[in-house]
Structures are given as structure tokens and as C-alpha cells.
Image (cartoon, rainbow, N blue to C red):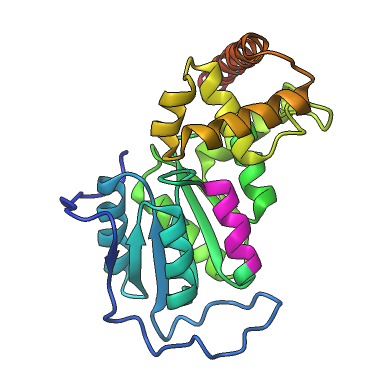
Amino acid sequence: MQMFPLESQTSNIVTTRRDCGPDRSSTTKSLMPSPILLDTKARVLIVHHTPLVRSGLVALIQATGRLAVCAQTDDAPTAREMFVEHQPEVVALGLTLHRGNGIELIKDFRRLNRTARLLVLSAREDPLSIQRAFRAGAHAYLALEDDSSEVVKALSRISEVNLYASPSVMRRLLESLATNQIEPARSEVKPLSDRELQVFSLIGRGFGASKLATELHLSVKTIETYQAHIKEKLGLHTAAELSEKAAHWMLHSMRRNLQLRKLIKTAA
């Protein structure tokens, strides 16, 4: 990630209470978004599975002088608890998390407080992930390769109730539209939930049930339940059919993304 100076991180779950302003947990929030007031420091919750990314975001956010990190974690259930406790105005999160999925977390945050601004910072730059993140309720999407100035710009834009995609992400979306690469409404994977799609893609990369359970911090039984649901939704009958289907879909996605990268290089 070409963003900012990085610091070592010794704990996956850290809560910072200073500079977070008064406790607003009892404040009644409007259902309609309103601009973040910049005369007080807005609370920021950081949820990302990479310690270096979290520490880098902390340094960048604190340096703005207008924002304060209230809490940080790499764990989805803990993030929900922190969101309720700290009532952050902004959440910066990744899509791959311990014991959870970033897309589902975005949906949860939107249900809990529709006024919070949600910024995604992810290594997943495929059009489907970007599309699903915005549909879930994200306000901004940045790639890990983006410069730190893009993070600052995104924070500024979403504080004014705007949507934002970094230039690299926007190029992906535009090229995808131009070449019909964004998953159509009748895509074969459309019936899958975001969590099921994550499991499906990992199966396509050769992950078995045990490895999936380790990767996603779930039980093998839970993984087997996901596999059963995926087979039912896609009309598959055996584990072999599921593996073959997932591998084919992943190969197609990789080829599509490679073509997209070539188009972007040519355009640049």
C-alpha cells in the first residue's frame, strides 16, 4: 500500500477515547444524512484485517486535525459492538475481516445508523466487489494502492454527503461498463449472498472446508452449511460440481480482470 508512514501494531483491538468529543449515544439521530460538522472532531472507527493498514490510517486520520480515531479492530463482531458503543460519524473498513465479511458489516452499520459515513479501503478491485459495496451502502471506495491524498479527499467528500471513488477505482468501473464486464442483473452468481459469494470464490481458488473454516474463522459445520446453500441456489448436486463451477467462475473473473488491467494501461 503506497499510503503513509506505517507504525507497528501490537493489538488487534484498540480503543482510543481521547479527542472523541462528548458521548452522543443518547442523541436522537435524523434518518436523513447531514454534513459532518467540522468544528468538532468527528469520531472514526477503523475496521481492517491488516495491522499495518490500521496503524497507517490512525496516523493519517489523526494528522488531519479534524478527525479522531475512537476505536479499531480486525474482527467483525467486535466492530459491531464498537459501532454501538462509540457512535462514530465515519467508519473506514476493509472487505476481508476476521469472523465476518465487510459487505455484511456495511449493511449492519447502515441499519444501526444511516447517518454514519462508510469508506472502504480494500485490495479487492474487481467490479463486482466495488458494485456490491456501494449497493450495500458504502459512501467511498479506495484501493490499497491509492495514495494517502485519496484517503483525505475521500474523507472530505463523504463528510459533505457525497459518494466517492478514487480515480483507479473509477477507471475500473468505467472500463467495466464500456466492455460489459460488470456482472449483469442475471449473473449466475446473483442469487448468492455476499458471504456465500466469498465462500464460492475461495472454493474456486481451491479451498476445502477445513481451510475455508480457518480462513474465515468459522466452524467447518458452518462452512458446510454455506456450501449446501450455494449448491441449492446454483442448481448443483455434488461437491465436485460445486468445485468445478467455482473454479470456472474464478478463472473467468481472473481473465476478465486481466483484460481490464490491460485496457486501463492502454488508456493511461
By secondary structure, the bulk of the magenta-drawn segment is best described as helix
Q: Position of residue 91 (x, y in %)?
A: 47, 62
Which of the 4 quarters of the picture holds residue 222?
Answer: top right
Tell whether 9 sits left or right of 139.
Answer: left
Instruction: Find the magenta span and give its range.
Output: 101-111
Q: Position of residue 22 (x, y in %)?
A: 39, 90
Residue 125 at least partly seen: no
Choose between 94 and 256: the one closer to the eye: 94
Residue 239 at least partly seen: yes
Question: Residue at image x 53%, y 69%?
Answer: 159
Q: Is residue 122 above or below residue 115?
A: above
Question: Residue at image x 52%, y 48%?
Answer: 102
Q: Position of residue 184 (x, y in %)?
A: 79, 29
Q: Is residue 36 above or below residue 10?
A: below
Residue 147 lies in the magenta stretch = no
Question: Residue at image x 41%, y 74%?
Answer: 43
Q: Position of residue 232 (x, y in %)?
A: 76, 26
Residue 108 lies in the magenta stretch = yes
